[in-house]
Image (cartoon, rainbow, N blue to C red):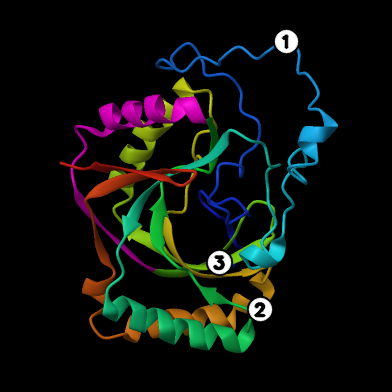
Amino acid sequence: MSAAPLVGYSSSGSEDEADAAPPSSPGAGGRGCGRSPLPKERFPVPESVLSMFPGAEEGPQDDRAKHGGRIRSFPHERGNWATHVYIPYEAGEAFLDLLDTLLHHAQVHVPRLVAMEAFHLSLSQSVVLRHHWILPFVQALKERLACCQQFFFTANQVKIYTNQEKTRTFVGLEVTSGHTQLLHLVSEVDRVLEEFDLTTFYQDPSFHISLAWCVGDARVQLEGQCLQELQEIVDEFEDAEMLLRVLAEQVRCKSGNKFFSMPLK
């Protein structure tokens, strides 16, 4: 089985405002989010001042050791905020038991695999917002999602994913029911992304909840026999049918270190 592209992840796990590439200006449909004019000239900082703040004029160093060896996929630029729209999933004890069983088995093939710290289902790719666009963007999302209903979806098909750069590999549970409702949410999110001239979601998304990840492309080790064994663990897990039936009751937007929740009706 070939790996599908990861939905909505960048290869950096950083949560600060710098994990974003330089954005374009919002289109005519953007709501109150025009780019502020930049000063025509930047005057140099005196050496006497610079000496008081060593390294103040230097860009931040991308220390991979601080985030598990992950490689930043966009250049660091002050004022840019990595932004992601998704459905959160609050894991209960039974789900964590299943995750622990799956992880221990998968680590026989790829020992560097680690469990995700939080769980979600992506409705957008990771995109870039300037700081002053965040609130207009969130308000536009709230307006688009105001009439969307809560629904159930099932995620019980084990699948191996990579991010677009093939620098990270993920073990995930793919959605097998609830596609229609998820595609409706994506269409509403996409309309907001288009207003801000941002990249929309994948045309044929593989909706999923990621369970574990590792640095590098580990598809060869995880697909085939290992994947089949992981699926058998899921199929035979007690109460798996109910456990992996998820209620989508809110959409969340994360921009840098800010979180915004939009309840579904």
* Dots 1, 2 in contact, CB < 8 A: no
Residue at 66 percent across and 61 percent down: it is 70
Q: Amino acid at mark 3?
A: Phe
Neighbor class of circle 3 (other Cα within 10 Å; few <14, some 14-19, many 20+) is many
Q: Nearer the viewer, residue 63 or 124?
A: 63
* Dots 2, 3 in contact, CB < 8 A: no
Task: Give the image location of residue 162, x and y in percent.
Answer: 61, 60
Residue at 27 percent across and 27 percent down: it is 143
Task: Give the image location of residue 46, x and y in percent.
Answer: 81, 28
Q: Quadrant of the N terminus?
A: bottom right
Alpha-carbon span between mark 1 and mark 2: 54 Å
* Dots 3, 1 in contact, CB < 8 A: no
**Which residue is situated farthest in the left direction here?**
265
Q: Quadrant of the C terminus?
A: top left
Query: Is 155 within the magenta?
Result: yes
Q: Amino acid at mark 2?
A: Gln
Neighbor class of circle 1 (other Cα within 10 Å; few <14, some 14-19, many 20+) is few
Position of 139 with respect to 265 (left or right) is right
- Asked whether residue 17 is in view, the answer is yes
Magenta residues span 131-156
Circle 3: element type: strand
**Which residue is situated farthest in the right direction here?**
47
Task: Give the image location of residue 238, x and y in percent.
Answer: 26, 86
Q: Nearer the viewer, residue 147 or 179?
A: 147
| Image depth: mark 2 or mark 3 in front | 3
Residue carrying label 2: 221
**Mark positioned earlier in the residue sequence (1 or 2):** 1
Residue carrying label 3: 170
Query: Is 211 within the magenta?
Result: no
Q: Amino acid at mark 1?
A: Lys
Residue carrying label 1: 40
Circle 1: element type: loop
